[in-house]
Image: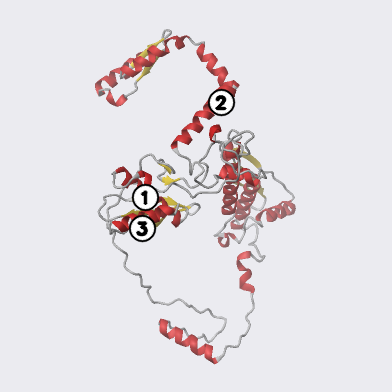
Amino acid sequence: MADIKNFLYAWCGKKKLTPNYDIRAAGNKNRQKFMCEVRVDGFNYIGMGNSTNKKDAQTNAARDFVNYLVRIGEMNAAEVPAIGVSTPIADQPDAAGDAGFGNLPSSGPLPPHLVVKAEQGNGNSGWGRGGSDGGAQWDRGANLKEYYAKRDEQEAQATLESEEVDLNANLHGNWTLENAKARLNQFFQKEKTSAEYKYSQVGPDHNRSFIAEMQLFVKQLGRRITAREHGSNKKLAAQSCALSLVRQLYHLGVIEAYSGVTKKKEGETLEAFEVNVSPDLQQQLASVVQELGVSVPPPPADPSSPVSLAQGKLAYFEPSQRQTGAGVVPWSPPQVNWNPWTSSNIDEGPLAYCTPEQISGDLHDELKYQLEHDENLQKILMEREQLPVKQFEEEIMAAIDKSPVSTSSAAPSLRCLVAPSPSKVPPTHRTHLCVETLKL
């Protein structure tokens, strides 16, 4: 993909122009992205591209600008380099005649769903689905599910690590997820009481999470305390619930603060030791400090008193460059490797290097396969064929196509009002239609 940048640079060089790239960070901290804008003097257009790294963001922006040059006739489409880098394919029979569902281009690298298939020991690196041609098999979406399942596991692990981060434990007696549950069990043994966690599930099946809840009676206070916490799994939800109860007990004065050594303070237990520094090294350090203009504070009289190394010198920042062009709303016509809903390039998954024709062919073959093999869908279609309204399907569709508003009535008090183009109906007619619909 990097060839498109050199291609644009060479084309601009012939015109004695230089493409200017502007990169800035975008996205959130969990999924960092970079957005790149490319401008060329003399053209009222800004090429845009984004990716998870700066190099691919520049490449996507360059390709967007090249596509613009092709649209306005400044460049021939046949001269533009193809997406992807040629990948050598192992010796295998030609499967061009067997192109079908899942047939991917040979000009790009191996898609992730085929990479997952290869990692499981298939050893095939073909593109098609030929039954005995030695190509990688497309198991009717199974490979794609394996790829996304692997990615979901990575995202779940990242979510679990982020949930365990605790930055304000020192405000609550240094009680954390690691030590709170053990302290709560000690409290139960000492008070000779017990309580159980009550779990409940929330969220859809593909993004299931848990809520743990517990009520605890405290004899010293004569009252009950309640905790209800959320977690990505039962273990983390129970740990969070126990942490909430322990922190409440700490702030109410029932239990003490955590007295053990925390992970955060392990580095503070290191003992000081003396080192011998040569006079030459001391002189070099003094000269460097003098050149940088840093004032070293004198050592305090009491060695146990803290010393601040912060300097009262303001940092100098270079003036930022002024933007040459006005801001634009990100937009791009339908093209390969672009998601118009999120205004971002598709860098992962099997859709990264597929052409629109191949994507449409895959969708067509998948629907055709479903119509032939899905018994539930066939049963639903047969039931629809038996409905009385099926006999008037063509007449109803023709009426909807010709009229802005169509009314269809079957049995008494059962009517259907269809407005394919509500914006074309005058406001007075809309009010009349609403009143008539309420009367029905």
Look at the numbered disc 2 and give the secondary structure of its residue: helix
Is residue 15 depicted above or below 436 in this figure? below
Crowding near pointer 2: few (<14 within 10 Å), some, many (20+)? some
Q: Could you tell me which residue is drawn at 30 percent across and 19 percent down? A: 404
Label 3 vs 2, first from the N-terminus? 3
Q: Nearer the viewer, residue 62 or 157?
A: 62
The answer to whether marks 2 and 1 mark residues whose Cβ atoms lie closer than 8 Å is no
Q: Separation of disc 1 and disc 3 at Cα?
A: 10 Å
Label 2 vs 1, first from the N-terminus? 1
Picture disc at residue 382: none
Q: Could you tell me which residue is drawn at 61 percent across and 68 percent down? A: 265
Crowding near pointer 3: few (<14 within 10 Å), some, many (20+)? some
Picture disc at residue 22: 3
Specify the quadrant of the image occupied by residue 402: top left
Is 336 left or right of 349, judged from the image as shown?
A: left
Q: Which residue is label 2 attached to?
A: 370
Q: Nearer the viewer, residue 95 or 372?
A: 95
